[in-house]
Image (cartoon, rainbow, N blue to C red):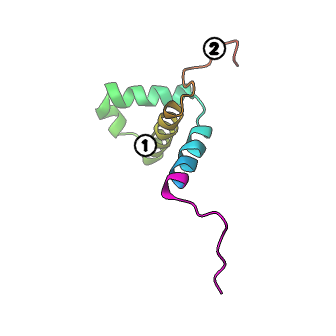
Amino acid sequence: MITRSSFNYSNEDRETKRLRLRADAFQHSAAMERLAEMKRDRPEQYDQMGAVAHLSLGHYEAAKAAAVQLGRNVSAPTDREV
């Protein structure tokens, strides 16, 4: 027996939800920003970092890009915002 949902998700709906969830997960991190700077400015040193650092930075950058795409503020919080 096949049960059909009254609402069929399209690929766009899934992509929009994925983008929103990824953007919701973004929290500014000074440590990740320093790691991104290292990747940009000192790639040989970054390449010697462990796999966890590479994965963490990848997730951080993806979440940050999603937040930017949705028009959210991704700058470092000021003292008043903390």
Residue drawn at x 67%, y 67% as measured from the top left: 6
Q: Position of residue 2 (x, y in %)?
A: 63, 82
Q: In the depicted view, which residue is nearer to us: 61 or 30?
A: 61
**What's under tag 1, amino acid-wise?**
His
Residue drawn at x 54%, y 54% as measured from the top left: 14
Whichever of callouts 2 and 1 sits on the residue coming sooner in the sequence is 1
> Rounded to the nearest whole Å, what is the CA distance between mark 2 and mark 1?
27 Å
Q: Residues within 10 Å of mark 2 (few under 14, many from 20)?
A: few
Q: Position of residue 69 (x, y in %)?
A: 49, 34
Residue linked to disc 1: 54
Q: Residues within 10 Å of mark 1 (few under 14, many from 20)?
A: some
The residue range painted magenta reads: 1-13
**Tag 1 secondary structure:** helix
Q: In the depicted view, which residue is nearer to us: 65 or 30?
A: 65
**Tag 2 secondary structure:** loop
Q: In the depicted view, which residue is nearer to us: 19 or 38?
A: 19
What is the chief secondary structure element of the magenta stretch?
loop
Q: Is residue 20 above or below residue 36?
A: below
Q: Is residue 16 left or right of residue 39?
A: right
- Residue 6 among those drawn in magenta: yes
Residue drawn at x 43%, y 43% as measured from the top left: 54
Furthest-bottom residue in view?
A: 1
- Residue 10 among those drawn in magenta: yes
Q: Position of residue 38 (x, y in %)?
A: 38, 28
Residue linked to disc 2: 78
Total residue callouts: 2
**What's under tag 2, amino acid-wise?**
Thr
Q: In the depicted view, which residue is nearer to us: 1 or 61?
A: 1
For the N terminus, which image quadrant? bottom right
